[in-house]
Amino acid sequence: MKTFLDLLNTASNQTIEINIDLRPIVDNGVPWATVIVNDICLLDQHCSDFTNVTCQVPLMASFKIVVEMHNKIYDEHRESALVIERLEIDDHLILPKFNHLTQYTNDHDKVVYSNYLGYNGTWVLHIDKPFYQWFHHANNRGWLLHPSNKF
């Protein structure tokens, strides 16, 4: 495995892989799932079984992962929901460790930091810098020096 500094010196055409595993809860109907990465829709369908979504993003790019759930029928006694069972970026398990860095906007205006989408709404993880820089910061590994052209 390459070190962080090795990754910074790689060619711009390298990519990292994103794996998302979705598990529906269908006791009260099948939820509609939409998965979008960087404005590219990877999944937009009823999610009745375990579903895996995989894509590649450029190594040195920022990106946004969006998971939406629609078509929930609210019932006190039976549940329908969508669970993000696993989110892995370049073989690093992101959920549940980084749930606190996600946003979940839903139709009940509940503030929830979770991988359990129990309301119709949109779950977002925004990686606002190259992944390994974000990952270093999210793990509280200290400061990183930014490359400089001055020598």
Image (cartoon, rainbow, N blue to C red):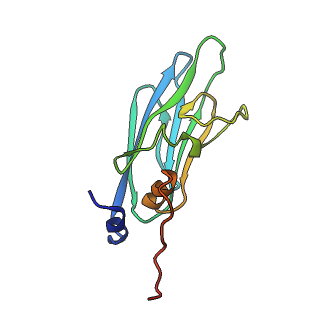
Image x and y of residue 8, in percent: 37, 69
Q: Residue furthest top?
A: 77
Image x and y of residue 59, in percent: 39, 62
Q: Residue furthest front?
A: 142
Q: Residue furthest bottom?
A: 151
Image x and y of residue 22, in percent: 44, 33
Q: Give the number of callouts.
A: 0
Picture layout, residue 130 above or below residue 44? below
Residue 102 visible within the image: no
Picture layout, residue 71 above or below residue 63? above
Q: Nearer the viewer, residue 3 or 143?
A: 143
Q: Quadrant of the N terminus?
A: bottom left
Q: Residue at x 46, y 85 (%)?
A: 149
Picture layout, residue 15 above or below residue 83? below
Q: Quadrant of the C terminus?
A: bottom left
Q: Nearer the viewer, residue 82 or 6?
A: 6
Q: Residue at x 48, y 26 (%)?
A: 24
Residue 59 visible within the image: yes
Q: Residue at x 46, y 57 (%)?
A: 136
Q: Residue furthest left?
A: 1
Image x and y of residue 65, in percent: 51, 49
